[in-house]
């Protein structure tokens, strides 16, 4: 039996069954779909005779390829729909269908109408397997995943559809065949889809680069050609997450001011601008203070987020650091756009940013140039402060390590938790303005600076990439630099901490060097003189918030 690609093929021989003969007529509708009709049993073994037993109303059966590769679904947008399962038309509340992150999946969300028999609340996920056109109608077959699936036959469904106005009319089969779907009014149920107009289509993300990578290299952020969608993907996860720009927010308070009315909360003023070309929300709020030296806010945005077939709305804040470093603050998923940036779903005062660097980032001049000697590892210093020998003269006569910046006090022996002090000295911008070198007694780890910024309180954040063989481990690091003591030419002290995942504002210096790729070290300028070394190394010389960075993760949950 041979099947042609585009035409009906009739079997060349009959099939013998129970001392009778049947005629099969097989159609290949799609590479994943075969349809066939079979005649009643006949006693004659002549092909013409037994095929004459086929009638026009013979049941049309379907067969589906078991290892089928899904195909893109023919409904790429979001729709509301009304449906009729035989008990009447269910229109209110409206049901919805939208495409998923993967183009070959659709999510139908049925709503029950209280006065319509046979209507019910149900979520149905459809994987599209084949699409073809026959006459004036189009056909779609797919695997349906819902709570009533009990067998393989229950998984497969066939749809007939045709464009109608701003949407589609559809008829759905009641079994794993397309039998009876000769018109859009047949089938076990009928649906009418109406396209949802996407507000905020003129909303754009004002980003300079189209490709960004997380510090650890595991995450990739792609910006679409028209800057309307952010597509975030990671290695080993099921499908990307997309954030489509829905609205821009002109201003947002660092601490939201809202009135409580009954059981709901709302902003003091929230009105939609009718004169703006962009569909924006104007939120009455305290002005957001910013320093051009500290950050360049790109704005707050309400986004439509999709992950798989799950969707919702999220408020995000974009901050561009030094043109090559991007930080994103994201809220929680809200069911409606108007609530996404409310205090229930978005904390504007949070510093739980996700950090990204441009994929083609160039090297830049490093901040805090100079030569520094390591006077204490923060973990070792704190342990020493609790020991009765913390201030003993022996600690001042530790072995010296020769570096380009002069002699520096070498770190003490490994602490009880087995974490060795990582470095003995630091030089910034000495061999080149865009180079940072971390010295050990054996070799130097060389890093290239890509971008830095300073935040209130004086902390500087620096994104670097390793360029030497000694710089093993993470592809990129975020260094946190904090200066202490005099800032004149005579020198001063500085604390440096490192993270391989993101630029955290929450540093627990007591635990950082041995936890989640973090470490911290206290240094002093080589020009400060040896007389300040003992003071800089005291555990109480530097004060840091003891907050746990493990409570935060890259990109929202």
Image: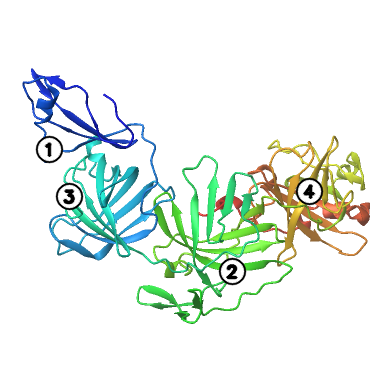
Q: Which mark is residue 299?
A: 2
**Which of the two labelled residues, at mark 1 and mark 3, occupies the earlier sequence position?**
1
- Secondary structure found at label 2: strand
Circle 3 sits on which residue?
A: 187
The residues tagged by marks 4 and 1 sit, at their Cα atoms, a distance apart of: 74 Å
> Could you tell me residue 270's position as x and y percent?
46, 79
Give the image quarter of residue 60: top left
Choose between 425 and 295: the one closer to the eye: 295
**Which of the two labelled residues, at mark 4 and mark 1, occupies the earlier sequence position?**
1
Could you classify mark 3 by the number of other residues whose Cα lies within 10 Å: few (under 14), some (14-19), or many (20 or more)? Answer: many
Give the image quarter of residue 525: bottom right
**Which of the two labelled residues, at mark 4 and mark 3, occupies the earlier sequence position?**
3
> Could you tell me residue 114's position as x and y percent?
17, 63
Residue at 63%, 48% in the rendered image: 501
> Could you tell me residue 336's position as x and y percent?
40, 66
Q: Which mark is residue 58?
A: 1
Could you classify mark 1 by the number of other residues whose Cα lies within 10 Å: few (under 14), some (14-19), or many (20 or more)? Answer: some
Q: Please say if the residues under marks 4 and 3 sit with CB atoms less than 8 Å apart.
A: no
The residues tagged by marks 2 and 4 sit, at their Cα atoms, a distance apart of: 29 Å
**Which of the two labelled residues, at mark 1 and mark 2, occupies the earlier sequence position?**
1
**Which of the two labelled residues, at mark 2 and mark 4, occupies the earlier sequence position?**
2
Circle 4 sits on which residue?
A: 448
Question: Mark 4 or mark 1, which is nearer to you?
Answer: 1
- Secondary structure found at label 1: loop
Residue at 67%, 46% in the rendered image: 500
């Amino acid at each position: 039996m041979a099947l042609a690609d585009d035409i009906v093929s009739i079997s060349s021989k009959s099939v013998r069954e129970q001392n009778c003969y049947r005629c099969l007529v097989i159609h290949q509708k799609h590479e994943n779909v075969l349809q066939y009709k079979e005649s009643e049993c006949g006693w004659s073994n002549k092909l013409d005779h037994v095929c004459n037993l086929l009638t026009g109303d013979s049941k049309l059966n379907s067969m589906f390829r078991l290892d089928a590769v899904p195909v893109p679904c023919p409904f790429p947008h979001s729709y509301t729909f009304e449906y009729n399962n035989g008990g009447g038309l269910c229109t209110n509340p409206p049901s919805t269908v939208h495409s998923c992150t993967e183009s070959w999946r659709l999510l139908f969300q049925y709503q029950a109408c209280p006065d319509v028999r046979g209507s019910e609340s149900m979520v149905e996920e459809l994987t599209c397997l084949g699409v073809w056109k026959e006459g004036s109608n189009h056909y779609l077959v797919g695997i349906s995943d819902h709570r009533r699936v009990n067998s393989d036959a229950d998984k497969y469904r066939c749809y007939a559809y045709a464009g109608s106005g701003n949407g589609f009319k559809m008829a759905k089969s009641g079994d794993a065949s397309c039998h009876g779907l000769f018109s859009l009014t047949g089938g076990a149920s009928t649906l009418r889809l109406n396209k949802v107009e996407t507000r905020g289509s003129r909303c754009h993300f004002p980003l300079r680069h189209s490709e960004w990578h997380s510090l650890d290299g595991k995450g990739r952020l792609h910006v679409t050609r028209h800057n309307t969608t952010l597509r975030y993907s990671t290695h080993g996860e099921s499908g990307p997450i997309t954030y489509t720009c829905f609205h821009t927010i002109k201003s947002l308070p660092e601490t939201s001011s809202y009135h409580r009315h009954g059981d709901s909360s709302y902003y003091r003023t929230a009105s939609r601008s009718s004169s703006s070309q962009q569909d924006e929300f104007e939120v009455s709020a305290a002005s957001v203070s910013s320093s051009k030296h500290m950050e360049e806010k790109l704005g707050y945005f309400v986004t439509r987020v999709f992950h798989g077939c799950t969707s919702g709305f999220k408020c995000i804040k974009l901050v561009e650091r030094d043109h090559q470093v991007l930080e994103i603050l994201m809220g929680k998923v809200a069911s409606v756009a108007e609530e996404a940036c409310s205090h229930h779903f978005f904390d504007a005062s949070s510093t739980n940013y996700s950090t990204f660097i441009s994929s083609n980032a160039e090297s830049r001049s490093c901040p805090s140039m100079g030569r520094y000697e390591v006077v204490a590892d923060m973990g070792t210093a704190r342990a020493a402060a609790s020991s009765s020998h913390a201030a003993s003269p022996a600690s001042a006569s530790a072995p010296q390590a020769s570096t380009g910046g002069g002699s520096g006090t070498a770190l003490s022996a490994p602490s009880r938790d087995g974490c060795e002090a990582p470095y003995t000295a630091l030089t910034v911008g000495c061999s080149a303005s865009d180079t940072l070198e971390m010295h050990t007694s054996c070799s130097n780890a060389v890093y290239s600076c890509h971008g830095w910024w300073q935040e209130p309180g004086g902390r500087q954040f620096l994104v670097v990439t390793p360029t030497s063989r000694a710089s093993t481990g993470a592809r990129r690091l975020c260094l946190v630099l904090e200066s202490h003591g005099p800032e004149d030419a005579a020198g001063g002290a500085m604390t440096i901490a490192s993270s391989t995942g993101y630029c955290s504002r929450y540093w627990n210096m007591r635990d950082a060097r041995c936890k989640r790729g973090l470490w911290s070290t206290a240094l002093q300028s080589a020009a400060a003189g040896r007389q300040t070394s003992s003071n800089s190394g005291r555990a109480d010389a530097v004060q840091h918030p003891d907050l746990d960075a493990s409570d935060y993760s890259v990109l929202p949950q």
